[in-house]
Amino acid sequence: MTTESRERRSRLSKRALRVWAWIAGGLAFFSPWVALGLSPTPAAQTGTAPKARQVVIVRKITRRVIVQGGAKPAPIRHVTSSSGGGSYSPPTTSTSGSIVP
């Protein structure tokens, strides 16, 4: 074993570390869009047009609505009481916060 001292490695400052962290984060964020932008586009079909699909109507429903006349409103009946008692207010069930002996 040797007792020689090693030369100490220099460290980056906090500011330099932050700069490198921002650069790495930006590259990680934008790399998917760059990869999609650089990918080749699908080749367009040339020559024959695609065949037209055959249309099959499984069920066709036709409804006809015939309106013969407008609806007549129901007659309004007014019911009167023959007791002649007049109107009165119902008894109060709340004391409105005050205590009555």
Image (spheres, helix red, strand yellow):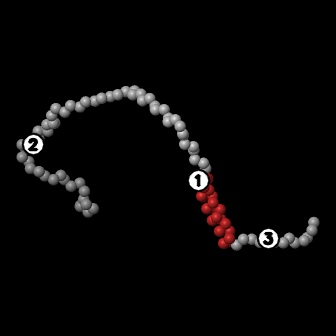
Q: In which quarter of the image is the N terminus?
A: bottom right
| Nearer to me, 77 or 34 | 34
Confirm whether residue 32 shows in the render. no
Q: Is disc 2 placed on a helix, strand or loop?
A: loop
Q: Is disc 3 placed on a helix, strand or loop?
A: loop
Q: Residue furthest right?
A: 1
Q: At 8% from the left edge and 48% from the top edge, which residue is drawn?
A: 85
| Nearer to me, 75 or 80 | 75
Mark 1 nearby-residue class (10 Å; few <14, some 14–19, many ≥20): few
Residue type at the position of mark 3? Arg
Q: Name the residue under label 1.
A: 37
Mark 3 to mark 2 CA distance (whole Å): 103 Å
Mark 3 nearby-residue class (10 Å; few <14, some 14–19, many ≥20): few
The spot of residue 26 in percent (x, y) is 61, 62
Look at discs 3 and 2 and give the one toward the viewer: 3
Q: In this view, does 30 lie to the left or right of 1?
A: left
The spot of residue 64 in percent (x, y) is 25, 30
Q: Which of marks 1 and 2 is nearer the N terminus?
A: 1
Mark 1 to mark 2 CA distance (whole Å): 78 Å
Q: Mark 2 points at which residue?
A: 78
| Nearer to me, 66 or 42 | 42
Q: Do the residues labelled 1 and 3 touch (CB within 8 Å)?
A: no
Look at discs 1 and 2 and give the one toward the viewer: 1
The spot of residue 44 in percent (x, y) is 54, 42
- Give the numbered dot on residue 9: 3
Confirm whether residue 42 shows in the render. yes
Q: Is residue 62 left or right of residue 23?
A: left
Q: Is residue 1 shown above or below 78? A: below
Residue type at the position of mark 1? Gly
Q: Is disc 1 placed on a helix, strand or loop?
A: helix
